[in-house]
């Protein structure tokens, strides 16, 4: 049996300001660094066979903290296709700013992401296909054991939509994926989602609400 822990990166300053990141390469905030350290502590007792990470530094920093805390020799391997969806002209803006500049497009996106074309952004179908391909490549190189995949809220949502056979638009409206949250999936025959968005390891560092979005 292969178990994969899908980890959303820890918090950045832009997450704290509710700014849309996408491909913007923003580092962890001081709070995010503490969250990443807590992840390292949580994974310390697990014999990880591998750690994969998006190339974006918020993800790499989180993966490095997990590796440092684990002590079993696994080192992060960059999988570029685990990067967040590119959100084009929206990046750096808050949802309120997006609505003001793009005729309430963020509110439309919250209802049905697939109905919105973001200027300069990555098409949703292209994004989901690259994430799907990244998972297939990684699984192809895995044996039995436990692995960590550090990425982004949009990536984890896309993977869960595929694994659960769920409508992506509907899933995005109902799914909460916090910074430094952990989702677990077992592969071996039919994939099984064991849990979604565990944050108990964060203690007082866990987000109190959904401020910061999934991007």
Image (cartoon, rainbow, N blue to C red):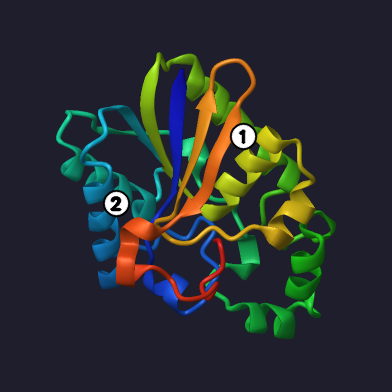
Disc with the residue nearer the chain's start (1 vs 2): 2
Vertical placement of 139 versus 180: above or below? above
In the displayed structure, would residue 41 be above or below residue 129? below
Residue in the picture at 74% in, 67% down: 110
Q: Would you call the spot at circle 1 few (<14 residues within 10 Å), some (14-19), or many (20 or more)? A: some
Name the spot of residue 133 as percent of width and height, x first: 60, 27
Quarter where residue 200 is shown: bottom left
**Residue shown at 40%/50% (left/top)?**
56
Residue plotted at (39% across, 68% down):
206
Identify which residue, 102 or 136, lies in the foreground.
136
Q: Is 184 or 120 nearer to us in this picture?
A: 184
Observer-nearest of 102 and 160: 160
Q: Residue 130 occupies which quadrant of the picture? A: top right
Q: Secondary structure at mark 2?
A: helix
Secondary element at image label 1: helix
Classify the position of the C terminus by image quarter: bottom right
| Residue with the mark numbered 2 | 39
Please indicate, yes or no, whether residue 120 appears anywhere in the rendered image. no
- Look at 54% across and 54% down and name the residue there: 153
Q: Give the camera-side residue of 106 and 160.
A: 160
Assess disc 2: are there few (<14), some (14-19) or many (≥20) residues with their C-alpha within 10 Å of its C-alpha. many
Q: Position of residue 5 (x, y in %)?
A: 43, 38
Q: How far across and how far down the image is residue 10, in percent?
A: 37, 59
Query: Dot 1 corresponds to which residue?
Result: 130
The number of callouts visible is 2
Image check: 146 left or right of 190?
Answer: left
Q: In the displayed structure, would residue 150 be above or below residue 76? A: below
- Closer mark to the observer between disc 1 and disc 2: 2
Spatial separation of the CA atoms under disc 1 and disc 2:
27 Å
């Amino acid at each position: 049996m292969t178990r994969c822990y899908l980890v959303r990166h820890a918090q950045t300053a832009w997450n704290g300001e509710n700014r849309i990141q996408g491909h913007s390469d923003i580092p962890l905030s001081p709070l995010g660094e503490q969250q990443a350290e807590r992840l390292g502590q949580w994974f310390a007792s697990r014999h990880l066979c591998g750690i994969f990470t998006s190339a974006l530094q918020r993800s790499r920093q989180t993966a490095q903290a997990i590796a440092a805390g684990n002590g079993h020799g696994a080192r992060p391997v960059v999988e570029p296709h685990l990067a967040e969806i590119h959100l084009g002209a929206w990046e750096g803006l808050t949802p309120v700013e997006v609505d003001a500049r793009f005729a309430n497009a963020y509110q439309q996106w919250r209802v049905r992401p697939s109905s919105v074309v973001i200027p300069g952004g990555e098409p949703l179908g292209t994004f989901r296909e690259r994430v799907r391909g990244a998972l297939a490549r990684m699984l192809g190189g895995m044996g039995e054991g436990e692995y960590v995949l550090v990425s982004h809220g949009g990536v984890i949502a896309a993977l869960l939509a595929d694994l659960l056979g769920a409508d992506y638009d509907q899933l995005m409206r109902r799914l909460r994926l916090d910074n430094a949250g952990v989702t677990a999936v077992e592969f071996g025959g039919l994939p099984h989602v064991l849990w979604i968005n565990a944050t108990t390891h964060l203690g007082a560092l866990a987000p109190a609400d959904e401020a910061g979005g999934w991007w």
